[in-house]
Image (cartoon, grey):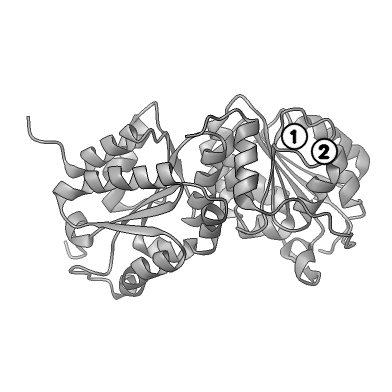
Amino acid sequence: MPPASWQAQVYAALKAARITQLAYVPDAGHAYLIEAAHADPAMRAVVLTTEEEGIAFAAGAWLGGQRAVLLMQSSGVGNCINMLSLPVNCRMPFLTLITMRGEWAEFNPWQVPMGTATPSVLTAAGVHVHRADHPGDAAEMVAASAALAFDSAVPVAVLFSQRLVGAKVFSK
Amino acid sequence: MRNDGTLDRRSVAATLLRDPGDLLVVTGLGAPSYDAAAAGDRPLNFYLWGAMGGAAMVGLGIALAQPHRRVLVLTGDGEMLMGMGSLATIAAAGAPNLAIAVLDNARYGETGSQRSHTGLATDLAAVAAACGWPATTTAHDMQEVEALRPRLRRESLFAAIRIASDELPRHLPPRDGAYLADRFRRALGIAQD
């Protein structure tokens, strides 16, 4: 049997962290996690119209006694900034997994500004930022970030680098 | 379109929140938070003082985590307009234990009473219906508001309530978010994680 993909290991890390709600804005880099969540009767998967909805959603899940994760792409980070005042002010855990664009063999220049700004704007908004560059690191990074978020009640983002996820191919 | 609201917002809130029992209440920033506090502060009220546009989604997160309890989001037209996409998200997710009541004065009351979209062009109940909400309504008088009270605790209902745009004295609830979150979770009996 081949070793599980790093995405499958990440999903297992979310399960091990007792996450039961997964909100997402669709993204090719998160496709495995999104499909796994929809196929899992013990995970509630919720599709969003915009990323900041997921911050408020995760806050509600926490108020209700459950743990949520938000999946998005780096282009969505800018939408989230004011809403991050919610977990920061309320001293709530918050975990988000972000696939990076605009940094590794990017074809679409419109992805570059937000990709470049992602780590610094998250940090400025009070989010702890971790980064996974290699397949072997990703699940451990998610597990450690979930522990930090939920045990220490802080917002944490894990950036999946574009090299790890694979650059989007535009020409067929 | 113009604001045709005549209802006193404090009377509306007091009616909707009368005998709340274990109703879980999330309020949008500004006057709806003051209205809910004026109706009676309680640990199962979670007041937003910011995070504009987020009230409905906080409600959805609670509703999915607590499927056997009722959740009511009480917010204003400006706050709901900022989170209008969440009406589609909630309808798509399906949350039979979640209802939203919008106190609609067609104004941005907190910033100088500028006119909002609901007084210029937009019918929020129609928006919710188009997003797929199974039940939507607009209330114009206190008899209709009284009838909303049980429906908001039973149905997946979106209700716009046309209130007058008078500015009332502020009735400020606690604003320490960590305190509000902690007392809400304790009141729900959630063990420290």
Chain under numbered label 1: B
What residue lies at 66% left-to-right and 51% top-to-bottom?
B127
Whether pointer 1 and pointer 2 mark residues with C-beta atoms closer than 8 Å, the reply is yes
- The answer to whether residue A94 of the structure is visible from this angle is yes
Q: Position of residue A158 (x, y in %)?
A: 32, 54
Q: Residue B148 appears at what percent x and percent y?
A: 81, 36
Give the quadrant of residue B60.
Answer: top right
* Residue B75 x %, y %: 72, 51
Image position of B65 (left or right of B100): left
Q: What SS does tag 1 mark?
A: helix
Residue placed at 28% from the left, 38% from the top? A13
Q: Is residue A148 above or below residue B52?
A: above
Label 2, on which residue? Answer: B16
Residue A68 is situated, as x and y percent measured from the top left of the image, at 44, 41
The amino acid type of the residue labelled 2 equals Leu
B186 vs A163, nearest the viewer:
B186
* Residue found at the very far left of the displayed protein: A1
- Quadrant for residue B51, please give it: bottom right
Identify the amino acid type marked 1. Answer: Leu
Of A130 and B67, the residue lying toward us: A130
Q: Residue at x 83, y 54 (%)?
A: B171
Q: Is residue B15 left or right of residue A68?
A: right
Q: Where A91 sits versus B68, above or below? A: below
Image quarter of residue A44: top left
Residue B152 is labelled as: 1
Relative to A114, is B182 on the left or the right?
A: right
Q: Determine whether the residue tagged by mark 2 lies in a helix, strand or loop.
A: helix
